[in-house]
Amino acid sequence: MSKSGQKCVLVIDGALPAGVAANTAAILGITLGKRFPEIVGPDVADAAGRVHTGITGSPIPILKGDRALLHDLRERLCTEEFSGLLTVDFSDVAQRCRVYDEYISGAAAASPEEFTYYGLAICGDAKKVSRLTGSLPLLR
């Protein structure tokens, strides 16, 4: 993902409690790490020789949206115009499940309108990502 012309952002619902927002960002980040293992740099050593596990070498802004904006973004990401972007979503459908099989069956039973998105990770062509998210404020 550190390639020139590529960008990755997280968009989190700013109304979420801090713990749920942090959990959402963590879940999205883990999935990005699986999809883009090259995003994680090598381990580094400090002056005492202690090893610090590699972290992302690319900036990943965490932006703020609201429930309606997240749903609209998710819908737009399903269009042909944005089909080349990687989209990772975390929703109420996923959050209420304790095992992955529950998520699989819950998602299969829910229509797109029934999902309430807590956050999205959007990665790919920087111009397209910016077109979708360039006006959003940072989550603070």
Image (cartoon, rainbow, N blue to C red):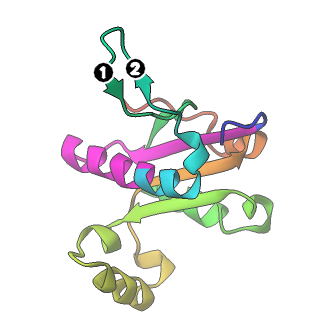
Q: Is residue 107 visible?
A: yes
Name the mark on residue 80.
none
Amino acid type, callout 1: Arg
Name the mark on residue 45.
2
**Camera-nearest residue between 50 and 96:** 50
Question: Which residue is at 63% across, 49% downward?
Answer: 123
- 128 vs 107, left or right, is right
The x, y position of residue 98, in whole percent, is: 20, 75
Above-or-below relation of 44 to 135: above
The x, y position of residue 53, in whole percent, is: 38, 34
In 3D space, how far apart are the residues under numbered discs 2 and 1 (Cα atoms)? 5 Å
Question: Which residue is at 75% across, 60% downward?
Answer: 84
Question: Which residue is at 46% across, 29% downward?
Answer: 138
The x, y position of residue 17, in whole percent, is: 21, 45
Label 2 SS: strand
Name the mark on residue 50.
1
Question: Which residue is at 33% across, 16% downward?
Answer: 49
The x, y position of residue 121, in whole percent, is: 52, 51
Q: Quadrant of residue 96?
A: bottom left
Position of the C terminus, as image quadrant, is top left
Position of the N terminus, as image quadrant, is top right
Magenta-tinted stretch: 6-29
